[in-house]
Structure formats: structure tokens, C-alpha cells
């Protein structure tokens, strides 16, 4: 089941590989961001794939349409499952990205959660992304229901800010895994609650069981 995405927010390949192997029974997709990608590049992608798992390449492309198109083609050649683009890149950029044949899934960032915004702006950008042929958006737990209502249930919502229990960190707009899934999230992205747990495999297993018993 591809519901939970583990954010591999670590600095080196060895630590990442241990996390992939330890949590493999409970996680199918691993998110690789710029920090790890800039350090380990293709090696990290191959490591995840060699362990029989999928890659979510979270590099948030935002550039001129031709460059984003070629970036999507390069990501396709790497065989990743999904990637991110910024909806703020605009209609032409989103369309060029979405038009790449045989491409990975594309999820658009509406508004970064670090920025102040309104639900109207999030919806405006989600609708733009949908109309351009993008598969879904990254959205906070609080926006899931509204996006599903406005963009339809088949437009995917990928949700970070997942906290199984009450925690005190920099994520302000959080939800439990069950609340996010109940609200309609197609995928949840979990980082620190698993990677910083004393036992990451157990933390991943707990989330897996919660979701599978719903
Ligand atoms: O550690 P935590 O569970 O907060 O990790 C969430 C992951 O999702 C991080 O990799 C973070 O960069 C990413 N993310 C996010 N909010 C967004 C987009 C991505 O927290 N809007």
C-alpha cells in the first residue's frame, strides 16, 4: 500500500539506507529532497530502487517552461515515481511539465506552508495545477477537504505535517495520520516522527497499522 511516504531528511546515504531497510515492510515511497540529492545524487535513487521501493523526488521545480520540461524528462529517466513543481511557475510551465510522455506523477506545491496565505489562494493554484494536467498537490492537513471539494476526489492530495501524537516542533498545521486520511489525503508524508524515533521501524509500523485498520 503506497499511502505513507517517508521523508528521508538525513544527510548521508548510509543513514538513509538503514532507514529504508528498517522501515521497508511499512513504507513503499521514500521522499528525497535537495539536501540528500545534492550529496548523493543518483546513488540515493538507485539505493531506494534496489530495495524494491519507489522514489518521490521533491526538488520543487520552478523555472522557465523549457527547463522544467527537461527536468521532468531527466526525472523520468531516473525512474522516479513522483516529483514536485511550484504552481507559482505558471500555466505554461505546468503544462509543459505535464505534457512529458511517460512521466512520473507530478504534484504541485500550492503555497509553501512557511508562507502566509488564504484558502482562496490555495484553491486558485490547485485549480490551475489541475487544469494544466498535473496529478495533484501538496497540501496541509487543514486544506485537504476544501481541495477535494473544489478539485474533485481524483485530484491527488499529498499531505505533510503529520504527527501521530502531540509534539512541539516547527510544523504548525498538523494532523494525526488517521485524521489526514479521513479528510481524504491520498498520501501522507512523514519525516521526523519516524526518522527521529528511538525505533523508526516501530514508529513506521504504528502508522501503517493505524491506516490499515481504518
Ligand atoms: O519531519 P516532518 O514530518 O515535518 O517532515 C515533513 C516533510 O515534508 C519535510 O521533508 C518537509 O520539507 C516536507 N514538506 C512540508 N510542508 C510542505 C512541503 C513539504 O513539511 N508544504
Image: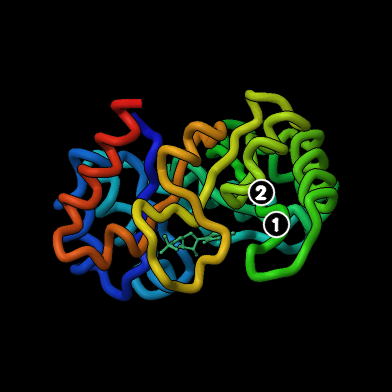
**Would you place residue 202 above or below residue 149 in this image?**
below
Horizontally, is 103 left or right of 109 in the view? Answer: left
Cβ of mark 1 under 8 Å from ligand 1: the answer is no
The spot of residue 212 in percent (x, y) is 30, 28
In which image quadrant can residue 111 be found?
Answer: bottom right
Name the secondary structure under disc 1.
strand
Q: Is residue 64 left or right of residue 167?
A: right
194 displayed left or right of 57: left
At x 71%, y 37%, the residue is 147
Q: Is residue 58 above or below residue 151?
A: below
Q: Which mark is residue 98?
A: none
- Front-lying residue, 115 or 17: 115
Q: Quadrant of the C terminus?
A: top left
Name the image quarter holding the N terminus: top left
Residue extending furthest front?
Answer: 166
Query: Label 2 vs label 1: CA separation?
Result: 5 Å
Location of mark 2 (residue):
108
Q: Quarter-wise, where is residue 157 in the image?
A: top right
The percent position of residue 101, horizontal first and vertical second, equals 63, 32
Residue 85 image position (x, y, % from top left):
65, 54
Quarter occupied by residue 3: top left
Query: What crowding class fits label 1: few (fewer than 14 Cα within 10 Å), some (14-19), or many (20 or more)?
Result: many
Of the two numbered discs 2 and 1 on the same chain, state the one appearing first in sequence: 1
Seen in the picture, residue 3 relative to 166 is either above or below; the reply is above
Residue 36 % position (x, y): 38, 69
- Within 10 angstroms of label 2, few (less than 14), some, or many (20 or more) residues? many
Q: Secondary structure at mark 2?
A: strand
Q: Residue at x 48, y 69 (%)?
A: 34
**Residues at badges 2 and 1 in contact (C-beta under 8 Å)?**
yes
Residue that numbered label 1 is attached to? 86
Amino acid at each position: 500500500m503506497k499511502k505513507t511516504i517517508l521523508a528521508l531528511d538525513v544527510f548521508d546515504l548510509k543513514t538513509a539506507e538503514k532507514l529504508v531497510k528498517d522501515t521497508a515492510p511499512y513504507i513503499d515511497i521514500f521522499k528525497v529532497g535537495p539536501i540528500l540529492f545534492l550529496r548523493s545524487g543518483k546513488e540515493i535513487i538507485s539505493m531506494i530502487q534496489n530495495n524494491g521501493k519507489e522514489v518521490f523526488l521533491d526538488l520543487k521545480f520552478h523555472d522557465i517552461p523549457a527547463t522544467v520540461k527537461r527536468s521532468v524528462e531527466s526525472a523520468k529517466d531516473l525512474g522516479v515515481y513522483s516529483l514536485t513543481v511550484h504552481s507559482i511557475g505558471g500555466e505554461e510551465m505546468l503544462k509543459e511539465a505535464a505534457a512529458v510522455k511517460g512521466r512520473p506523477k507530478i504534484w504541485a506545491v500550492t503555497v509553501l506552508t512557511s508562507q502566509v496565505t488564504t484558502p482562496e489562494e490555495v484553491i486558485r493554484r490547485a485549480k490551475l495545477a489541475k487544469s494544466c494536467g498535473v496529478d495533484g498537490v501538496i497540501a496541509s492537513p487543514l486544506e485537504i477537504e476544501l481541495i477535494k471539494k473544489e478539485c474533485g476526489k481524483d485530484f491527488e492530495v499529498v499531505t505533510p505535517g503529520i504527527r501521530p501524537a502531540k509534539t512541539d516542533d516547527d510544523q504548525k498545521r498538523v494532523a494525526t495520520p488517521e485524521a489526514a486520511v479521513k479528510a481524504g489525503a491520498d498520501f501522507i508524508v512523514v519525516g521526523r516522527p519516524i526518522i527521529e524515533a528511538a525505533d523508526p521501524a516501530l514508529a513506521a509500523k504504528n502508522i501503517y497499522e493505524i491506516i490499515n485498520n481504518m
